[in-house]
Image (cartoon, grey):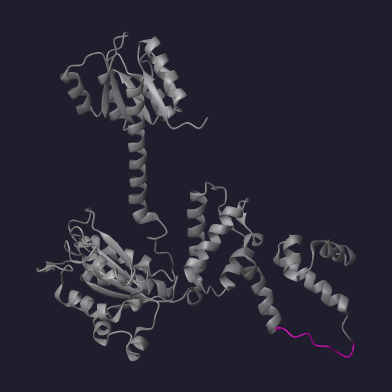
Amino acid sequence: MKFSGRIFMLDDDELIITMLSRSLKHAGYETMVQTTARNVVNNITEWHPDLILLDINLDDGANGLDILANIKKENIDTQVVMLTADDTAESAITAMKLGAVDYLTKPFNIEEVQMVVKGLLEKARLKDEIDYLRKSKSTSLGQQMVGDSAQFRSIRENAEKLAAAGAQTILITGESGTGKEVLARFFHEQSCRQGSGSQDYLPFITVNCTALPSNLIESELFGHTKYAFTDARTDKKGMFELANGGTILLDEIGDMRFELQSKLLRVLEDHKVRRLGGKSDISLDLTVIVTTNKDLEAAVTSKEFRNDLYFRLSTFNIKLPPLRERKEDIPGLAHYFLNFFSEKYQKRDITAFSPKTIAALCSYSWPGNIRELRNIIERCVVLGGEQAITMQYLPVELVDRPFVERRKSTRLILSEKGLSLEEIEKDLIRQALHLAEGNQTKAAKLLNISYDVLRYQVKKLDLN
């Protein structure tokens, strides 16, 4: 049976606690029962329950409220429900003040207990998810700036300077997958640290200008009033309002409709927004970051992008280079993604790359940039089973590349002495085995021959 949670129970009435334990086990929970207060806090600490059911009055002279106080003193992050035969408000209030989340009065209704337990455990799981998301704000893939190249350090320093100066409009350009949103979030975090309220939550709202339908993007950005259009049944805040006080990221601004660009320009100039159908302006105090993988100068020339909006956006422009132009950052990025995915997929034994794998990663041109690198490392972690990621887990295009480049740059010259075809065949098989790190199945794929043919040739040419 798959348990839905771990429940620790302390009650001196063995009959009641046994019956309660049996019913909870039947409902799919794992339980631990104790009828005395001896070593109870240590036992709770060692067992790591998700929920504690704790009797207030125990026969051995112990008091459940004192135990509750010790649980909180030890910072045991587990919800506690008090069990009591005393239905007076005083005991309940005391328990709540000490940190109990609820209390149940004897005699129990088993169904009521199960409902309370289920609700509290679902609440705890939700809290864990929220805590994870809050933590991921600074540690997830979407947030980390990784790199030590001169280009990367310069970009980071410029972003820090702009954040310190309080720049309110930033343009980030670069190919798809170069980390434009990562840089935007980094800028947002740096901006949050500048003021005295740096510990407060400041919104970061992302809008993908290509994902929203053209007939909805205006109301999504600026909001609307009730009856502003057919389906507007209530007032609605726009993304700019939701981001007020923080940062709004307009992703792929180069795809925004031409007529909508003029409204965006007014927002940037006036720091005000008006909902569709509205009669008054709403003041804004926020940072606007826009990103694009398009050449906006060319778009201005072709009349696809407003020149006045471009000049307004390009005051502070940060251009992210493609990964192929900052290859010294590839090992650091690869190890960062390796650590992240080995933790995510519970494969913590995978801690490194083989030297040949790192060389292959660094020699690849990465048309998909950092996003492509991330996806390949995730694939390697999922498929890998050894401590180090070896060449056999890389996709064919990465393994083939060193050989293809060598083949393009090397010419076999036929001399008067002649050249043995067997020598060529032997050399190619040796190269394939070297690239595949001895994996004959992989080597056969590199040579575009069957596994059985390769085995025959290896034996024939004495390459074992």
Q: Quadrant of the C terminus?
A: bottom right
- Of residue 202 and residue 424, the one placed in the foreground of this image is 202
Q: Residue 222, how many percent across, how many down?
A: 21, 68
Query: Is residue 76 visible in the rendered structure shown here?
Result: no
Per the rendered image, the range of residues in magenta is: 410-417
Q: Is residue 34 above or below residue 232?
A: above
Q: Does the magenta segment cover residue 416? A: yes
Quarter-of-image position of residue 173: bottom left
Give 43 or 12, whichever is nearer the viewer.
Answer: 12
From the viewer's side, name the closer residue of 97 and 349: 97
Could you tell me residue 43's position as x and y percent?
A: 41, 23
Image point (17%, 59%), residue name = 235
Q: What main secondary structure does the magenta stretch of the protein show?
A: loop
The answer to whether 38 appears left or right of 381 in the picture is left
Q: Nearer the viewer, residue 222 or 18?
A: 222
- Where residue 420 sits: x, y (%)? 88, 80
